[in-house]
Image (cartoon, helix red, strand yellow):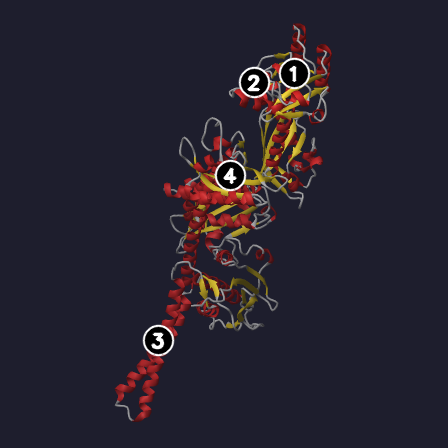
Amino acid sequence: MTGALSRHRTADGAERRLLALRASGLLGAPAEERFDRLTRLACHLLRVPVALVSLLDAERQFFLSAQGLAEPWAGRRQTPLAYSFCRWVVEAGLPLAVADVREDPRLGDNPAIEELGIAAYIAMPLALPDGCIIGALCGIDHRPRAWTAAEQAALRDLAGAVEAEMAAGLRQHEAETAGAALRASEARYRALFEVSPQMVWFTDAQGRCSYVNQYYIDFTGLPAEQAMGEGWLAAVHAADRASVRAAWAGAVASESGYEIEYRIRRGSDGIHRWFFVRGTPQRDPDGRVRRWIGVGIDIDDRRRAEDRLHRHSRRLELLSAAAAGLLAVRDPDEVLQPLFRSLAAEFGIDVSFSFVLDETGEGLRLASCFGVPEEARTGLARLAFGQAVCGTVAQTRRAMYLTDVQASGDPKLRLIKGHGIRAYACFPLLSAGDRLLGTLSFGTRGRDRLSEGDLAFLGTIAKYVAVVRERQSAEAALRVSESRLHLALAAGRLAFWEVDLDTGAVLRGPSHDAIFGYRATLPAWSYGAFLAHVLPEDRGAVERAYRAALNGESEATVECRIRRAGDDAVRWLEVHGRAHRDAEGRAVRLHGVLRDITERKETEAALRASGARLRELQAELLHVSRLSAAGEMATALAHELHQPLTAATTALQAARRMLAASAPQGPGAMTEVREAMDLAAGQGLRAGQIVRRLRDFVAHGETEKRPEHLPRLVEEASALAMVGARERGIALALRLGPRLPPVQVDRVQIQQVLFNLIRNAFEAMVSEVPARGRPATRYRELVVKAALAGPETVEVAVADSGPGLAPEVAGRLFEPFVSTKPDGMGVGLSISRTIIEAHGGRLWVEANPGGGAVFRFTLPAAPPDAEAR
């Protein structure tokens, strides 16, 4: 037979009988009328007072039915095995008929003869459908008697009826057992789904939702009953709902797999997040879809990162293409033509002109253009300096940004107005030595003005094309990273597992063994088999997580590496587990999920490497910025050095004349000579200090955060930044709070920030020149303050009394390539904010109540026991 008894086929003898009997569910079963009816019939046909259906256990005989048995045995429904006559029938497997039991050598000493008054006995063996004999149907008389052949035949027929009833009951018992096992299995899977870190859902065969797990309920805020049927669509973004409904209906109709990305509303704040949803049908043995099961994976962070990277990288890709082309060809205009087409798609640029300096050096020659008919190019072949917009830009060497061109009456705009241009930008192309090379211009017919961002980028094409090759490598790494993310998502299926702690047996999902490298499902799995795949250096962490899951009430999680079977590949796994406890609180099962996170780990490693490279590039850019600042200060430094060196030279010449005139007479003469020499020495030291400060500022040191004395950093940076301040009538006021703690910073980087902010403030005040003939109305003082802003934070402020910031620039001041200076690169404040944020601080700007601007930033205080340099 099949089912619960099939595993007993290989056993034999008493052991086989006992296993079969206990598996049948008959032993200890309550009295049933179907068996009592048969024992009553046996009493009637045999004309006996007692008839029994007896089952033999190891130490007792149990009466499945007892007709006419005296008390107390009838109430107990069992006797010790020593009282059993039926055991001879069960052991022999044959019928037994005894006319007088007292005369039978096998039964004569049985205590039941006296206690139960047994004189005559007849029995037929009872067997299960698989042939295993587990008991007997017997009749008992209190008087000796011979048993006729008809009576034996009647009892045999009744025994067949009893066996038929036992077989029917056995089938029912197996069905109930299987149903209970199915329900237990369903409950176990539900428990696994409840601890899943992703959405899990079921639907019926028609696609109506029938179950969502706790993660879905917690995320959407929808009660489970509201999500049933088509209620789950309420949480889908309105813009995605129709396409999601259509895709799901198509999958249900075709009975094929279902994969889609769409947005789901988060109940706590109403924000929609992107999810990758996958579903698959489950079929019955006949191949019909019984239900659907699926998961939802939160990919919002990945989608947003991809969108941001795409927006930022698109412009860098254009520069990258230009840089690669310029290195490969001799004529830059061969690269500009495809670049113009890209700009048309990205910015809506319809017209572009590239002019170069002509042979005379006194005019411009058209090198290439885009978006202009061939017949119109003749009038643009040559431009004199000052002619039209490009000639004017070449003459002044300043960019021009024109809006509402069609509404303007300026005769210089006649050429571009004739081409229907509404907004126009023209940039001078200048060499490193500020030599004019030509102009580059862009126009659009679709809008009346170009945005600040567009202008900043278009102006960057001429300045930063050389740095694009480095960015090309970064973009390639980004594409590889994106490819790995997509591959990890496609392969990232969850594998469920459950360990029975009593038997060690492991129940696992269909994709479990494939993760470990097995092409076919293994017949068995164990915790030991799992550990055998884990790399030795990770087994300690796995064992600790295993014990934590056994001993704790919450979920345990561990990341570990395994070596796959077959290809010996090393893969990363993320394993979640939770203990299931019985009524006494004892852990009886562990269940959880695991998934392959190798691609995520590799992506994290690549991002760390990319971050390290970006930090190196930032350090290089910082050094170049400092060199550039030093170059800008060259003229002012020359003046600063000229004064102490001239004074030292004059003092030495005076001392020489004193000594050459005649031998000094008296102590007073020698005093004058010493004073001249001291003056020369002091002025020489002053010049040395200026040079040393410049050298330290430009030095390219290693990045390292140490406890530093903040007042010293401020004084050293301001000494360089304020070069030339005295001649411009600008005073510096340092207001550094008492008992300032050391700060945990990189000295060179923070001095760069201080220099940038102080120098910017200085230049802002210099640029505010009063009208001719009118004196300045405000006191020109630059103030640097430092004070405690909290127990572990120091705030520094740089305030000027310049003209302040224009509203249209203030909000974008810290963006790359945004500058308020005509010749500024627009990277100083962006770098400064990056440095401050890397130190755990914040940099911002606000208006100075007395006029001008105040730049503030915070720095972390060093540990209390740290000693500043």
| Element on which disc 1 rests | strand
The answer for how far apart the CA atoms under marks 3 and 4 are is 64 Å
Does 234 sit left or right of 408 as displayed?
A: right
The answer for how far apart the CA atoms under marks 4 and 2 are is 106 Å
The answer for how far apart the CA atoms under marks 1 and 2 are is 14 Å
Assign the N terminus to one quadrant of the image.
top right
- Residue 8 in the image: state x and y as whole percent: 54, 21
The answer for how far apart the CA atoms under marks 3 and 1 are is 128 Å
Residues packed near mark 3 inside 10 Å, few (<14), some (14 to 19) or many (20 plus): some
Which picture quadrant has residue 676?
A: bottom left
State the residue at coordinates (49%, 45%). 544
| Element on which disc 4 rests | loop
The answer for how far apart the CA atoms under marks 1 and 4 are is 107 Å
Please name whichever residue, 339 or 753, is drawn nearer the observer in this view of the structure: 753
- Residue 188 in the image: state x and y as whole percent: 60, 33
The residue that disc 4 covers is 371
The residue that disc 1 covers is 137
Q: As displayed, is residue 316 above or below residue 71? A: below
The answer for how far apart the CA atoms under marks 3 and 2 are is 123 Å
